[in-house]
Amino acid sequence: MPKTALRSAPPPLEGNDVAIVGTGTVLWFVGFVALVPFQGRLSDHGHGTWPWICLSGGLLGLIGLKYCTARRAAIRRARAAEAAEATGSGTGGDDGSDNGTGAGSGTGAAR
């Protein structure tokens, strides 16, 4: 039994995924460009696949970059929709007549 009281876990930290994946992608392409001139020497020593591994890492990084930018945009849209919903429900509309049209037009304008 622990002697100290258990505390709740802090919220997760948000990192800049686009910058991290973008930096890694650039490094893979730099590795490819740096190794291509030495393709013959690398092949002689049994390492001829190294430049192509770097190229595939860069191409997969582009896919990851696309995914991260789409994820970031989806998170921003969700936060904007939550904010619009919070401000829309706080301004009134208790009779229920304005809920469908007011929230729908605000969400469409944000996209």
Image: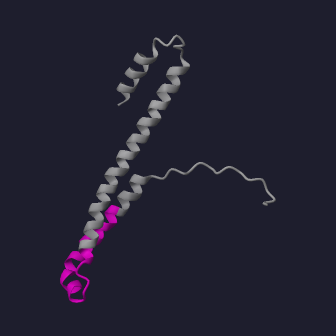
Residue 65 at x, y = what percent? 33, 54
Q: Quadrant of the N terminus?
A: bottom right
Visible in this render: residue 29? no
Residue at 49% over, 26% down: 85
Residue 109 at x, y = what percent? 35, 25
Q: Quadrant of the C terminus?
A: top left
Residue 83 at x, y = what percent? 49, 30
Residue at 47% over, 26% down: 84
Residue 95 at x, y = what percent? 52, 10
User: Main SS of the magenta segment?
Assistant: helix
The single residue placed furthest to the front in the displayed view is 1
| Placement of 102 over or under 74, stated as above or below | above
Residue at 26% over, 71% down: 32
Residue at 77% over, 53% down: 5
| Placement of 4 over or under 48, stated as above or below | above
The single residue placed furthest to the left in the displayed view is 40
Q: In the drawing, does residue 18 fall left or right of residue 31?
A: right
Magenta-span inclusion, residue 27: yes
Magenta-span inclusion, residue 23: no
State the extent of the magenta-drawn residues as a range. Answer: 25-51
